[in-house]
Amino acid sequence: MTDKAASQIEEATARVIELEAELEAAGSATTEDAALARAKAVLHAWVDSVTAVVATPGVGRAVLIHGNGTESRISSPDLPQKLAVPVTFEKRGD
């Protein structure tokens, strides 16, 4: 990782923790290899529990529906765009 990328990551994590503190909610961040690997493993298992996805690029939101019926809402400027199926104007065959 470059120094610039590391600095951008540190700035982003600090900004999120600061915003959470304003809401009087504690936050934690890590870039340490072992802790990051653990977080990624937890996230992979969480994503694997998804049974449906609703992507709404116009409002920057994705809703994940999990196997147990719970919903996880993700606000993101780019995730809903990545999940949405591209529009095509080609005529479908009958």
Image: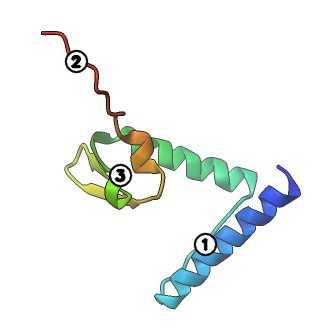
Tag 3 or tag 1, which sits nearer the N-term? 1
User: How many angstroms separate mark 3 from mark 2 (CA)?
Assistant: 24 Å
Q: Is residue 46 left or right of residue 9?
A: left
User: How many angstroms separate mark 2 from mark 1 (CA)?
Assistant: 50 Å
Observer-nearest of 43 and 79? 79
Q: Position of residue 52 (x, y in %)?
A: 25, 40
Element carrying mark 1: loop
Figure quadrant of the C terminus:
top left
Q: Is residue 59 above or below residue 16?
A: above
Q: Which residue is labeled 1 in the image? A: 28
Tag 2 or tag 3, which sits nearer the N-term? 3
Q: Hey, which residue is sitting farthest top in the picture?
A: 94
> Which numbered circle lies on residue 91?
2
* Three-letter amino acid code of the residue under disc 2: Lys
Label 2: how many Cα within 10 Å (few below 14, some 14–19, many 20+): few
Q: Hey, which residue is sitting farthest left in the picture?
A: 94
Q: Residue at x 65, y 69 (%)?
A: 13
Q: Is residue 72 above or below residue 29?
A: above
- Rendered image quadrant of residue 3: bottom right
* Three-letter amino acid code of the residue under disc 1: Ser
Q: Position of residue 9 (x, y in %)?
A: 71, 62
Q: Is residue 35 left or right of residue 76?
A: right
Label 3: how many Cα within 10 Å (few below 14, some 14–19, many 20+): some
Element carrying mark 2: loop
Q: Which residue is labeled 3 in the image? A: 57
- Rendered image quadrant of residue 18: bottom right
Pair 1/3: label in front? 3
Element carrying mark 3: helix
